[in-house]
Amino acid sequence: MRYKRYPAGARARGEAGVVTVMFRLDPAGQVVSVRVIGSSGHADLDAAVVAMVRRASPMPAPPPGAELALTAPIRFTLN
């Protein structure tokens, strides 16, 4: 989550929601693909999640035999 950035424009417009993202790693932990599979309904938030996953690459290498495709919900809330 340290790579997560709330887009300033989305924050100013009061946009919040959950983006579900799927990404695939190679055996070394590099992100090889990323896509939104559940939109928040806000293009800026969806794009921010794709950028977040790309910034986080490389990730720790998965253990041998581990699933290389991961799905995660990323929540944006205004406080």
Image (spheres, helix red, strand yellow):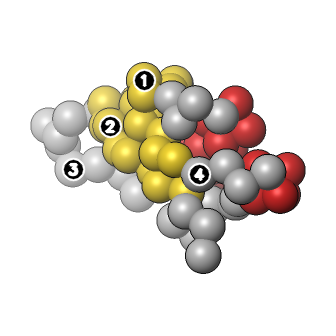
Q: What type is the residue that disc 1 sits on?
A: Ile
Relative placement, left or right, of 51 versus 71 is right
- Identify the residue under disc 1: 37
Indicate which disc, 3 or 4, sits on the residue closer to the N terminus. Answer: 4
- Identify the residue under disc 4: 16
Indicate which disc, 1 or 3, sits on the residue closer to the N terminus. Answer: 1
Indicate which disc, 4 or 2, sits on the residue closer to the N terminus. Answer: 4
Q: Is residue 51 visible?
A: no
Verify CB contact (< 8 Å) between mark 1 and mark 3: no
Mark 4: give few (<14), some (14-19) or many (20+) Cα within 10 Å.
some
Verify CB contact (< 8 Å) between mark 1 and mark 4: no
In this view, the mark in front (3 or 4): 4
Residue 41 picture location, percent across and down: 58, 30
Q: What type is the residue that disc 2 sits on?
A: Thr
Q: CA distance from mark 2 to mark 1?
A: 9 Å
In this view, the mark in front (2 or 1): 1
Q: CA distance from mark 3 to mark 4?
A: 34 Å
- Identify the residue under disc 3: 63
Relative placement, left or right, of 64 versus 1 is left
